[in-house]
Every structure is written in C-alpha cells, then in structure tokens.
Image (cartoon, helix red, strand yellow):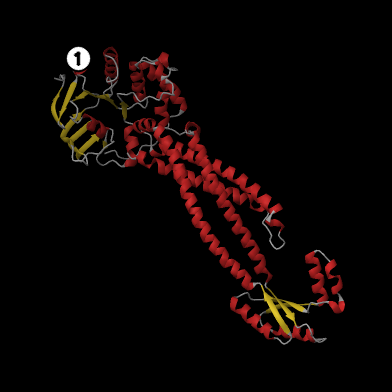
Amino acid sequence: MIDFRNVKKSYPNGTSALDGVDLHVDDGEFVFIVGHSGAGKTTMMKLLLREEAATSGSIIVSGYNLTKIKNRDIPYYRRELGVVFQDFRLFPTKTVYENVAFAMQVVGTPRSMIKRRVPAILTTVNLADKMNAFPKELSGGEQQRVALARALANNPKIIIADEPTGNIDPRMSIEIMNLLMKINKLGKTVIVVTHDKNLVDYYKQRVVILDGGKIAEDRVGGMFS
Amino acid sequence: MRNEKKAPRGRYSVRFFLKQAFTSLWRNGVMSVASVAVLMSCLVVLGAFVLLVANLNKNLDNIAKLNVIMVFCDYDLEEGRAEEIESDIKKLSNVDKCVYISKEESLEKMKEESGDSGIYDDMTGENNPLCESFEVTYANDDETEVFNLEAELRAVEGVRKITSVYQTAKTIDEFKNGIMLVFTLFLLILFVVSLFVIINTIKLSVYARRHEITVMRYVGATNTFITLPFVFEGVIIGVTASIVAYVIEALLYTYISTTGIGDVAFVTMIEMSKIAVPLAAGFVLVGIITGVIGSVASLRKYLKS
C-alpha cells in the first residue's frame, strides 16, 4: 500500500516540485504516473525511493512512514521495492546471472538460495538462455529485462519503473510492458513513471497525471491525453 | 507503523568484500601504488623516530642507573688519609656504598678502556699521574638529595673534585623532549598528507563505482555493506605499506647497529630481535587505522540516504 497525504516538496532554491499531493495505491495495483517535464514525476520517484524527504505531509509505503523513518532503516525499507531505471544501470563486467545475483548478495542472501532463485527469475523474464551473456551482448530490450529481473531478485512487494521504455524501440517496449503486466498479475504493485502516451493509452490502466506538482487527474482505465 | 529494522536474511561473505577491494585496487593501480608509497614513507619516518627515542631512553636509563658520583682526592694525599676520607664519606646520610679506587686500579681501568696499554707503560709506580678516588653510590636519587650529597662531598677535606652524571642525564632528557616535540609535529603533518593521498585513492574508486553504489542503495544495501569493500581496500593499502616499511626499517636498523652508531663505545643499541614484534605490530596498527579512516572519510558523501 502506498499512501501520500498532502505531500509537499520544495527544494532549497525555492522550487516547489510537489504541492499537496494526495494519492492512494492499493496492493496489487498497476499505476501509470505521467506528466510533462517538470510536472513532479521525478520528485515523486525520489520520495518513493526515500532519496528525498517530503517537506510536509505524510508518505506511508508498505507500512513504513517515510516522513519519520530513521536513516538506518532506509535500506530495509528499500528491500520492499524493486527499481527499474531508464538507463538499465547494469554492471558491464558482470554476466546476466551475476547482475541479478548481485542484488541478492547485497542483502546477504545465502549462496544456495541465489543459485536456486536467479535462474527462476531469469525464466520469468524469458532470459534463461542468456544467463552467461554480458550486457553489451544483449539488445536494449533484453538489458531492460535483466534490470527487471534484478528488481525482482529480492521478491519486493512494489516495482517502481522509471521510464522503463525510454531507451528501447517500440516493439521491445511492448515486451517490457507485457512483462510488467505479468509481474503485476503475480501480485506485485507496479508503478510506472513515463511520458509515453501511446503505451499509457494502449494498456488502459490507472493513470495519475501530474501537472505543476499537483495531481491533475487520477482515473482507472484512463488515457494520457 | 513498521519503522523497526528487519533482521538480515543471510550472512555476508568476506570473500565477496575482498574480491571487490582487490578489483578496485587493481583498477586504480597508480593511485594505489602512490598511497602505499606515501604511507610507507610516513611509517619509516615514524619507526625511525620511535627507535631513536627508545634507544635514547635506554641509554639515559643506563646513565641514570649508575647512581654514582666519582670523588677524586688531592694528588699529595698523605698515607692513610684515604681511609679517613672513606670514613667521612660513609658517614654522609645519602651514601649507599663507597668503594675505594687506588691510583693503580685507576690506571688499570684506563688501560682496559683505551685498549692500548703501551702508552701507559711509563706511568707505573712513582710516575702514576692519577689520584686516589672513591666511587660513591647514592641511595636516594631525588634531585635535592643528590645536590646536597654533591655539596657535602666537595666539602670533605682532601677531596679535590667530584664528577656526577646526574646533570648530564638531565640535560639529555630535556634535549630529548625538545626533539620529541619537533618529531611529533613533523609526523603529524606526514600522517595528514598520507591520509589525504589514501582518501583520494579511495575517492577515485568510489567515483568509478558510483553507479554500482546507487544500485546497491536501491536494492537495500546497508551503509556497512557499501562501506566494507572500501574499508578492506584501505586496510590492504595500510597493511601492504606497513609490511614494506617494516622490512626497510629492520634492514636500516640492523645496518646502523652493526656498522654505524652501534660501534661507538658509550652507546648501546637495543637488539633488533627485542623490538621486532612491537615495531611490526605498531606499523600494521597505524597502517590499518590510516586505511580505515581514509576509506570512511571518502565515502561519507555517498552514504547519505
């Protein structure tokens, strides 16, 4: 569950990025967060990842109160999330298997569990046959699938994808979106931040439109228009 | 509301951290070597200073341990007068022991110390130019007590002069304190310089791995987990520098003690075997502390939530 209540965020230079945002996302929902540049999407992402703290209001995610959370607890909160970036952020010197395994090593998962779980996740994202390949040997879509597998590695409740189709061609974009839908059907909450109008309109999920730091529209089965 | 920390799901592997640390050191080879070289230089200077002070202390202790005042009698002392002087000295309050040394014994001692008996051959019997003397050992080494005893000895009839190492030891001690102050300041500067070099080396590897650090943070790595490979890196630099510094120091010290200052008659040097373990342990400890401080200082910026 994600709950934003009257969330405001302003930066030291005086820029007001979010201005009284109220948003509630239930477990297992699929939500597109859309908006033009400067609408507040990136700030919303940073608040969700607890990279930044809200100036006022309250944010509760998976039972963690992000306005009161202690710094030492932030890593444990982040284990509830899986994050996918537009630029994939894969390690070029690690294989597909190692890239996914790394996310599990980081949280101290025993090696035996890593050995069991990584191939299973790679099967979910249809990359079981590319386990030993390096990122540079993969297409953009495949690299994003590895990133998705890495986001799933620690079995998070929420997947946050920041412009996941921004660096890949339209055909691959559909593939990634289909995977995100599949992951959503497995019970995960999926938040996709994007400005890709076609994708949003095609999938007809819940759409939250940000404009000038406020929620301009929040509609289930909505369109980005 | 769940804001409490959850237990980690498994144990972190030391091998994982070591692998990360060695890979990073290899990637920043030049800076790694520079860090080892600077830290090693600092440790060699530090070690030289510590050894100098240790040896100075030992020699000062040797001097202080003597607790002896040499009392020289008049040259034209009448026969039997020496016994009276000895009796007068023994009556003094701070005297522990008083040993009579005849002219002949003094001459023999001189011969032994010079190692060349030939030049003293004509000085026997009537031609002996030395005087009768006493070796007075005092019981209480308090400064006032020693000065009082010196004054009392000078006042004994038939005593020409006295020599005491007490004042010499004191002067050397003051000199040693001065040297220590200068060396400590010098070392402090060297330590800060080497710390900066290490911080820069680790900052380079932190920068090279900034994306990796971002991903680690987003998947829930704790600050400890992110910091440890860099701390290992700092420790590896520190330990390598300390080993090299120890070898250089040991070789230099052995060389000096066997061929240089060690040959000077009144200087005794501590044997290498006696200081090897504390010196090596000290080097490794300083190396590790510098490495750890350097790593943690480099990472502070990147560990903000």
- Quarter of the image that includes the C terminus of chain A: top left
Q: Is residue B223 left or right of residue A171?
A: right
Q: Is residue B73 left or right of residue A169?
A: right
Which quadrant of the structure image shows residue B214? Answer: top left
A222 up-or-down from B176: above or below: above
B173 up-or-down from B283: above or below: below
Give the residue number, with chain letter if any, for mark 1.
A202
> Would you call the spot at circle 1 few (<14 residues within 10 Å), some (14-19), or many (20 or more)?
few
Residue A50: x and y in percent read 28, 36
Say which residue appears at 82% left-offset and 64% top-offset: B116
Query: Mark 1: which secondary structure?
Result: helix
- Asked whether B211 or B107 is in front, the reply is B107
- Quarter of the image that includes the N terminus of chain A: top left
A123 up-or-down from A99: above or below: above
Whether residue B285 is visible, yes or no, is: no
- Asked whether B99 or B82 is in front, the reply is B82
Residue B131: x and y in percent read 78, 79
Residue type at mark 1: give it.
Tyr
Whether residue A81 is visible, yes or no, is: yes
Residue B249: x and y in percent read 61, 48
Residue A138: x and y in percent read 38, 16
Q: Is residue B13 left or right of residue B171?
A: left
